[in-house]
Image (spheres, grey):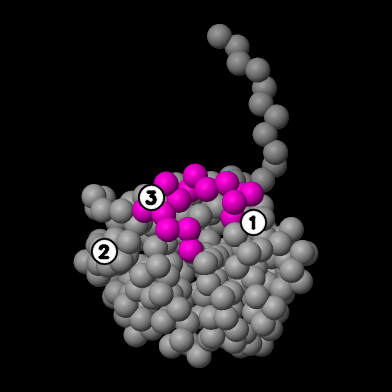
Amino acid sequence: MDFPALNIPAFDGPLAQRGIGVIAPFDLALERELWRWVPMEVSLHLARTPYEPVPVSMEMAHLVSNSAHLAAATRDVLHVEPEVVAYLCTSGSFVNGLDAERSLCKVICDAGAPDAVTTSGALAEVLRKLNLGRLSILTPYDADLTAKLRDFLDELGVTTVSSDHLGLGGGIWKVGYRTIAERILAANHDAAEAIFISCTNLPTYDVIDPLEDALDKPVLTANQLTMWACLHRMGLPIVGPGRWLREVSSLPE
């Protein structure tokens, strides 16, 4: 059988791949949103924490941040040689406070990762780089877990000037953009220098630029910050919305 000649471009192989390992809670449903934040040469390699039959709550935040589970998930992604491994969970990385967030990074590095990031640690980095000290926050959690986020911000020396929460125990990825935008606008406070929307399972990608235009202040979201922190360590710019976050990489350390 004769085969047609193939018109193959004269270069070697696909674009060189650079990897980010991602440890996600078992219920993450927004992998597609994560990919929108990274440039073409970056691949995301996901591992999940074990399934836990509990609603989104303080209990779940403790369960999905179990050190043994994070170490095992880290080892699961190391064979593809990621440059950094991210623990992609806001509540799991703030629920026990700032010292515990730092120890989660140590767990990941001790398991073999060359570098480590958590979502709440990424939030702390960006707040410091942008010199932000007063926030409005929106979470999908219940009141108790939202209070833990305020406690974490207090440890960072950041004041929560207004706070709102959706009180959801599950299905967070199903919340529509209109609801999210309306609740962010309602949660905003004139004294707030920025707004933080918590939870890596809450879709936010397409509302960031319109809200920043409307409010003229940074709108920071969980997946956005986590991907920024990973790419920053790799010397790469973030792809996607959020003009303040795009500019922060150019600021001095």
**Quarter of the figure with residue 60:** bottom left
Q: Which amino acid does label 3 sit on?
A: Gly
Q: Is residue 173 magenta?
A: yes
x, y (%) of residue 163? 53, 72
Write down the residue under mark 3: 170
Q: Position of residue 56 (x, y in %)?
A: 34, 57
Residue 197 relative to residue 100: left or right = right
Q: How dense is the environment of label 3, judged by Cα within 10 Å: few (below 14), some, or many (20 and up)?
A: some
Residue 15 in magenta? no
**SS at mark 1?**
helix
Q: How far apart are marks 3 and 2 (CA)?
A: 13 Å
Q: Earlier in the sequence, mark 1 or mark 2?
A: 2
Tell me which residue sits at (42%, 61%) in the image.
Answer: 141
Numbered mark located on residue 70 in the image: none
**Residue 109 showing in the rendered view:** no
Q: Point out the residue furthest to the top here.
A: 1
Q: Compared with residue 86, is residue 14 higher up or lower down, i.e. above or below?
A: above
Q: Quadrant of residue 59?
A: bottom left
* Amino acid bearing label 2: Glu
On residue 181, the disc is 1
Q: Distance between the residues labelled 1 and 2?
A: 28 Å
**On screen, 62 above or below 126?**
above
Mark 1 belongs to which amino acid?
Answer: Ala
Q: Is residue 122 above or below residue 18?
A: below
Q: In this view, does 164 lie to the left or right of 168?
A: right
Q: What is the magenta range?
A: 165-182
Q: Answer with mark 3 or mark 1, whichever residue precedes in sequence.
A: 3
Residue 15, given in percent of the width and then of the height, sits at 61, 50
Q: 82 and 34: which one is in front?
A: 34
The answer for how far apart the CA atoms under marks 3 and 1 are is 19 Å
Q: Are marks 1 and 2 in contact (CB under 8 Å)?
A: no
